[in-house]
Image (tube, rainbow, N blue to C red):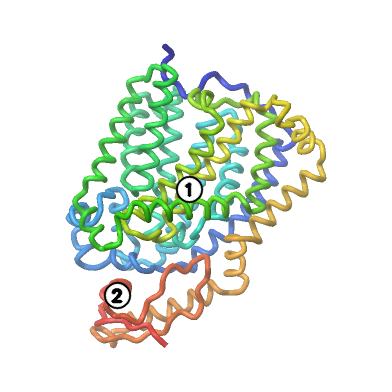
Amino acid sequence: MKAFSLYKSKPEKFQLTPLSSGNSQRLLLVILLILISPYFYLSFFNHPVADDYSAALPHHSSNYWAEQYYQYIYWNGLYSYNLLFFMNPTVFHNTSFYKIAPLIILISSIASICYFLHAITKHIFSSQIILNAGILFMLLYLFQMPSLAEGIYWYSGSVEYQAGILVSLIYFGLLCNYFNNLYLVSKRTHLALTGIILVFAIGFSEVIMLLLISFHLIIFILALANKVKIQSEWWIFLTLCFAFSLTVIVAPGNIHRNSFFPGNHRLVHSLLYTILQIMRFAFNWISNLPFLISTFLFASYAIKHRDQYSFPVELSCLKPVFFPLALIGMVFICIFPAYYMTGILGQHRTVNAACFFFTLFWFTAIAVLAKRYGNSKIANVNEIVTLFNFNKRFRFLLILALFIGLAATKNGQDCLMDILCKKANRFDTEMKNRNKILENPGNKRKLVHLKPLNTKPASLFVLDLNSDTASWVNSSQAQYYGVQGIICSE
């Protein structure tokens, strides 16, 4: 029997085409950097909110390692998330670093995407092409993620899900490189690092954990179905995945946290609403113009170069029905647990993770199907390739429409409006004025009255204070600033 290997055969060296020429790629990079720059720029108007203040309360931040134990026993088993959560810049009263944190998340996400793409394509594309592909993918993801504020700019949300996503991509990249004998330093070092990154990725969120479990199970089942001998190293990864997932699942804190949601554990209710949300978000993601254009352009490109790239051997045996089922399954994994454990969808940061992996697997499926059925007459492949590659005006209009759509609709539009209409500036000013009032020594141990925010930029706003001094949002911020309480009302 053949040993486990991620690639069926060595891919041919990639040949340059007009789209992949040096000048075209450099021009594309400039355009992509311009398109993604608003997301970077908005970071400088970012402010802590809600859970960010909870992380900095004295009883949380006084003993870092004792707090890790407390969280595991009384709140959750997300060991990686908890490590970063209590490194929140608010703990150090450093709002400047809070504004830098989204920049780190954005850059790290692009880097992890590029590393993954470089590994999965077995290094056959130039670094320039991979960089452009990574930025373009990140743009498409940012453009349509359900909550940009919760996914990128809110520290507590971004380190739980977006950080988990990028660490998972690094794991997948390391995994591909390991089984293709492309080691970092040495084979043993690479093996150890891959295992460490896997363990770290599992501890960010239940969603990431479940997706990783599903991935390992599918690979294992496919290997058995195709009578492929699995190398001993794969058993190490499989064991680590289940062992540390179990560590998260059996954490005593899960029971305590679930007690705050009396309407949970309703199976029928959870399934029904999960199905409705899958229909809602999946349609929203695939029906917008930039996504449709990206799909057509990528499919055309994948069809033309179907003989120049290679995919994991396990994918070659999959029937077409697997791909839509896998897409639905990914979204189900990201939505159902929240409904079942809390009774509500909760915040959209869980669906952000679904959006990322949905988009990633969507294009993976297209590449696999293009390679598998690229010669089919039924698919009218020749007409598609001819239309894309030889009608330069049509290709230019499509790419132009893609760029305009990314910049002027959905989250792209929100970012531009928040910047051009000075919403981000006004939000920043209001938040700074609030902080000055709360930091005023004369208000220590007093009940402070604040006005609700007048400006709530769509790309940055997560949650505001309210009129209830006992609410956890108000009380956490009150304790952080050392005031008796906060009332936020007109």
Image quadrant in which you'd find residue 156? bottom left
Sequence-wise, the earlier of marks 1 and 2 is 1
Q: Residue at x 77, y 44 (%)?
A: 395
Element on which disc 1 rests:
helix
Q: Residue 69's x, y, as percent? A: 18, 52
Please say if 441 is above or below 147: below
Of the pair 133 and 453, the residue shown nearer to us: 453
Query: Furthest residue to the front?
Result: 268
Q: Which residue is mark 1?
A: 109
Q: Amino acid at mark 1?
A: Ser
Q: Which residue is mark 2?
A: 471
Q: Residue at x 64, y 31 (%)?
A: 370
Q: Residue 146's x, y, as percent? A: 50, 58
Alpha-carbon neighbours of circle 1 within 10 Å: few (<14), some, or many (≥20)? Answer: many
Q: Position of 100 compared to 389: left or right?
A: left
Q: Amino acid at mark 2?
A: Ser
Element on which disc 2 rests:
loop
Q: Position of 50 compared to 61: left or right?
A: right
